[in-house]
Amino acid sequence: MKVVVALTGASGLVYGLRLLQVLRKLGHSVIAVYTAAAVEVAKHECLGIDFIEVVKKFADEVYSDSDLWAPISSSSNTPDAGVVIPCSLHTLSEVARGGNSGLVARVANNLLRLRRPLVVVVRETPLSLPDLRNMVAASEAGAIIMPASPAFYIRPSSVEEMIDFIVGKVLDVLGIEHGLYRRWGAVNRRGPDPCARIS
């Protein structure tokens, strides 16, 4: 499967980087697009790495959001599926209204036009009424809205397990098999109790 992964300026870039890493490991073709805001956020969240170099390491093709001449800007080169992860509220607005201001919005628009899967991983809280309306509009257009909301029934013992839960859910939506998290009914009860400090 050829998947485009768009990294935007919301907090949670690690979700997108981990998705790139897992898709590469599973043998899928990956195209990455990053926004200028993602580069700025990476300066605060990805202190131990060179953000762009890591993106290039795991993607077959890498484009900036400003590269409107990239092949994927045309619907004749639309990949099989796309994921905006993390998705900023600005990008959500673009997807909801069919915007074309940058490459991320253009690719999202192309995926929706061709009725191909587009997963929008929103990582923001709280949400305003306009934000919620944008989610509804994007969903009505065909996008799959997936807030980055880790589950605790998996009894995570690390931040990495919580990240893998979200990445695994994205792969579930795309129909890609994986073993990133324990599913309901197969929960490992040995992990820490998230309610242990509540009394």
Image (cartoon, grey):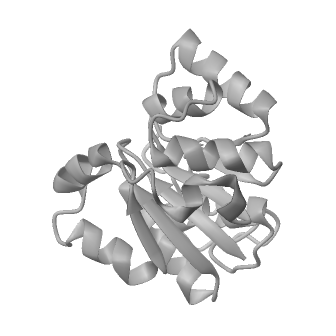
Q: Residue at x 44, y 41 (%)?
A: 102
Q: Quadrant of residue 67?
A: bottom left
187 vs 26, left or right, is: right
Query: Is residue 167 positioned above or below 97 on the image?
Result: below
Query: Is residue 20 positioned above or below 136 on the image?
Result: below
- The mark tally for this picture is 0
Q: Residue at x 17, y 71 (%)?
A: 48
149 vs 101, left or right, is: right
Q: Nearer the viewer, residue 130 or 147?
A: 130
Q: Quadrant of residue 167?
A: bottom right
Give the percent coordinates (x, y) of residue 15: 46, 60
Dividing the image into 4 quarters, which one contains the N terminus? bottom right
Q: Residue at x 67, y 50 (%)?
A: 119
Give the percent coordinates (x, y) of residue 129: 57, 10
Give the percent coordinates (x, y) of residue 153: 66, 56
Observer able to see residue 93: yes
Q: Nearer the viewer, residue 95 or 78?
A: 78
Q: Nearer the viewer, residue 82 or 11?
A: 82
